[in-house]
Amino acid sequence: MGLLHIQNSILFFYLSCFAIFFFSAHSVVPSPSGSINNDISALLAFKSALNEPHKALSSWKNGSGDPCSWKGVTCGPRPARRVTSLDLESLNLVGPISPRLSNITFLKNLQLNSNHFHGGIPRELGLLSRLESLELMNNSLEGEIPSTLSSCSNIQEFNLGGNRLSGEVPAYLSYLPKLNMLILGNNNLSGGIPPLLGNNTSLTYVNISTNHLTGAIPPALVNNSALIFLDLSSNQLTGSIPASVGTLSRLLYLDLSRNNLVGKIPPLLGTGINLITIDLSSNNLSQNIPPSLSNSSSLHYLSLAKNGLTGEIPPFLQSSSALGYLDLSQNHLSGDIPHSLGNQSSLNYLYLGQNQLQGSIPESLGSLSKLIELYLPINKLSGEFPSSFYNFSSISYISLSENELSGTLSPNMGKNLPTLRILDLQENKFEGQILPSLCNISGLERISLAGNNFSGSIPSCLGSLQNMSEIDIGWNQLQSDDMSFLTSLTNCKLLKSLTLQHNKLQGELPASIGNFSVHLQSLWFGENKLSGRIPAEIGNLDGLTVLFMDHNLFTGGIPSTIGRLGQLNALFLSGNKLTGPIPASIGNLILLNELYLDDNKLSGSIPSSLGDNWKYLEELNLSHNAFSGGIPKQVVSIFSLTRFLDLSHNSLSGPLPPEVGSMTNLVALNVSNNLLSGEIPPALGSCLLLQYLDMQNNFFQGNIPDKFTNLDGMIELDLSNNKLSGEVPSFLGNFTSLRYLNLSYNNLDGEVPKNGIFSNASAVFVSGNKMLCGGNPDLHLQSCSEGRKSSHTLKIIIPIASVVVVILLSLFCVFYRSKKSASKHLNDPIEHMYPTVTYTEILNATNGLSTENLIGHGSFGSVYKGKKLLRENNVAVKVLNLQQPGAIKSFVAECEVLRTVRHRNLLKILTLCSSLDSTEYGMGSPISRQGDAYSYGVLLLEMITGKRPTDDDLGDGSSLRSFVVLTVASPEKMMSMSLDPAISQELEDEANGSNSRAQMEECVKSIIQIGLSCSSESPGQRMGMDHVIGELKSIRERFPKFK
């Protein structure tokens, strides 16, 4: 007797003795010589604890005679006549398992599978020393497997699968000498597989799948030559597959799938003559596929999917009549598909998708006459659809998507493949028409031809396919001037998804779309040329979860009936010509996750009710519209917004509500190109996950909030073209993720930091802040030492301020005085009346209008000290704040006083100049392409509006450009107030033809946009003249009627 055998015998004896001692100390042991009455008592006690919805145990009654006739009860032969078997499988019994069953001492078979037993497994069952079969599968039992069951030394079948058992796999299972079948699958067991489990030579069937087992596969387990069935799938096993598994000659079934196994597949695995099933899928196996697997004559099922296997698919050298299922998908296999696969005459399922296979699809695969499913997507396959495939008489599923296949499909495809249910050819290079013969496949359920080059019309006969659930023909070149074919699809009562996205479809949607299937969940009409109004009947599709109608030519308002689509998750209406307000009913879409209304002509205020019910919204885009009024606090306090909120390019005014700080998970916020004012709310610094913040082109003022120091995950920050003041925060240099920072055209002052992003001049923009200094030399800012020198000189110059003269910066006064003195100066040019001075000369004389040179300021302007200007040593420069209401009137009054009053301390006016739309060349700027673009832009605006930059009716403080910007935000106001009278008259003449008027309005707006772009304050943002020419040509082509 070997040492190991002795150790095992001792351990088994110890466990048996322990179990006997345990029951002696804690249990009442019934006499083995008990009568049948003991069995009756135990059965009735068992029943009393149960709930029987179907009265399955109604025959179990006390005093009803022989219990051997009760349902599920079997007794042994006379004279003992004791209960030996209890089989109550699938009787819908509910309750605990009574420990009184241990009193049925002759019980050999306990079969309670597929009921609703709950609680723990009674430890008293270990007293059933004669028990051979314990079947408790598919119940709701909990707790650990009792250690007392080790006393059941005669047990052969141990089946506790499909419960909620926890703890480890008991080690004593290795020492039950007669154990033949072990099933513990579908539980919550953890720990490792007992290392000596394989030493039990009687063990032939092992299923411990779908648990939480860890560690390696014990070598002893796969050294057991008696093993027939081994299922360890869906655990967390690690390590490699023991090589000895390939030597198990009796093995029929091997499933190690859905673990974390690594290494190569054992080379001898396919040599077993009895092996029927091998599933090694969903692991981390690598290297090549062993040739033994492709040469097995017994394999019926082989799955190696979802691993990291490389190399080519080995050739199938012999014709096999057994292989019915082959799955090699989701690996890194390369090379061609072997022609020899066509020899597997019994193959029903072939999955080779999501690899790196190339070349053409072998015609030999057409010989697989029994093929039901063919899955070859996401490879690099080329060539045409094999003609032999039209011979498939049993095929139901073909997927060749995301390859490089080309050519056309056979016109008879629908007749040759009558059993087809799913056809997936998307993302290839197929061309030609969508075949009407597909309508002959009565069982067709899903067709996906998206992402090809199919053209022509959509067959209206598709509506005859009663089983159709999904039609995806988007991203092609399909054309239609009439969308009436949609009416035929109302006959597809099982339709769940319809995708026509990104084609060339045009025309109006019929009202009949409201009669689509009640099962419809997804509707994609976007990126076409659809026009007209969105039918109100779309509100009947209350099962929709996704609605894409973006980038078409839809007009009119958003139908309020959309608010009925209570299941909607995504609504895309962007890129149309929708007008009017946002319907308040959209606020009823409480399940919305994405809402895109951008790039339309929507107007009015943003309804405050929108944010009240949105608990799941993550993306909201209302940009590029004509919304006005304030930003509702409810909209900027939607806590669920995580991806982005875009309100840019509207006419929103007022402050940014401080409630914006409640969006603590927001990643991107864009409120740029509006009319927002006030200070940036410090609460914005509470949005700790913010990475993209764009607030450019507004009227924000004050300092950049100190609380922004919390936004250290920022990637892009744009605060340009506002009225921000104060210093550039030094903490911005500590933002390690920041890659773009634009603070240009504000009133920032002080020294620019040099660390972090500030060391990269190509990523930082600070131009237009005349008081900034220092920083990276590549930013070309003045040195901070020069600023300090100027302030020192100021202390000497200020005392003589009482004798300086005034330079008034406006041409309005010139025109005013010239009108009053018409008789004297009517024929004199302005340059003869006053010496000329450029804006650049004024900036040089005042050190960039620096605060060091500020003498004083009032309600309507500021006065700066200057020197060496117009041959004067000391001058005063008065700068009017034309944004302040009443500034112009005050200035005119001041001009009148200076014209009539004389005093020894009030000397004559030297000259005047203006910064209001006189081009940059008038300000002393050098000749440049950007300057030419600016001049051209102002000229365009003058031509369109019929106004001059100096006209009085532009409003206090307005330049011609800002006047146009304010009116462009309101289309109605623009077309009625800001156009040249001649253009307005043409529009009136076109009023009877709404299409012509609408086109002319669009033409005028397009030209205005060019003028605005060319005259942008920032030279870098101006449209280049080559771009201008291209845009004008495009406008002429789009609107040939108005050449």
Image (cartoon, rainbow, N blue to C red):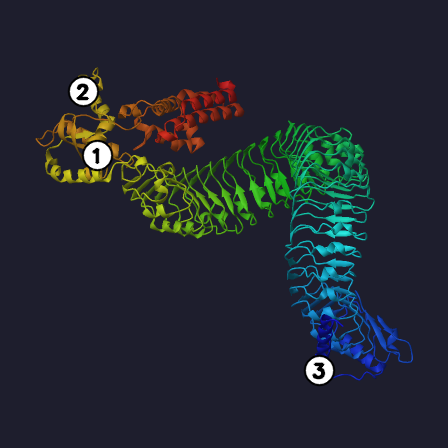
Q: Position of residue 190 (x, y in %)?
A: 64, 64
Residue linked to disc 2 = 833
| Whether residue 854 is visible | no
Precedes in sequence: disc 1 or disc 3: 3
Precedes in sequence: disc 2 or disc 3: 3
State how far apart marks 1 and 2 are (Cα): 27 Å
Quadrant position of residue 778: top left
Quadrant position of residue 77: bottom right
| Whether residue 1024 is visible | yes
Q: Residues within 10 Å of mark 3 (few under 14, many from 20)?
A: few
Q: Amino acid at mark 1?
A: Asn
Q: Which mark is residue 21?
A: 3
In front of the other: 635 or 210: 210
Above or below residue 490? Residue 688 is below
Q: On the rendered image, what quadrant is the N terminus found in? A: bottom right
Q: Viewed as shown, does residue 691 lie left or right of 351?
A: left
Q: Residues within 10 Å of mark 2 (few under 14, many from 20)?
A: few
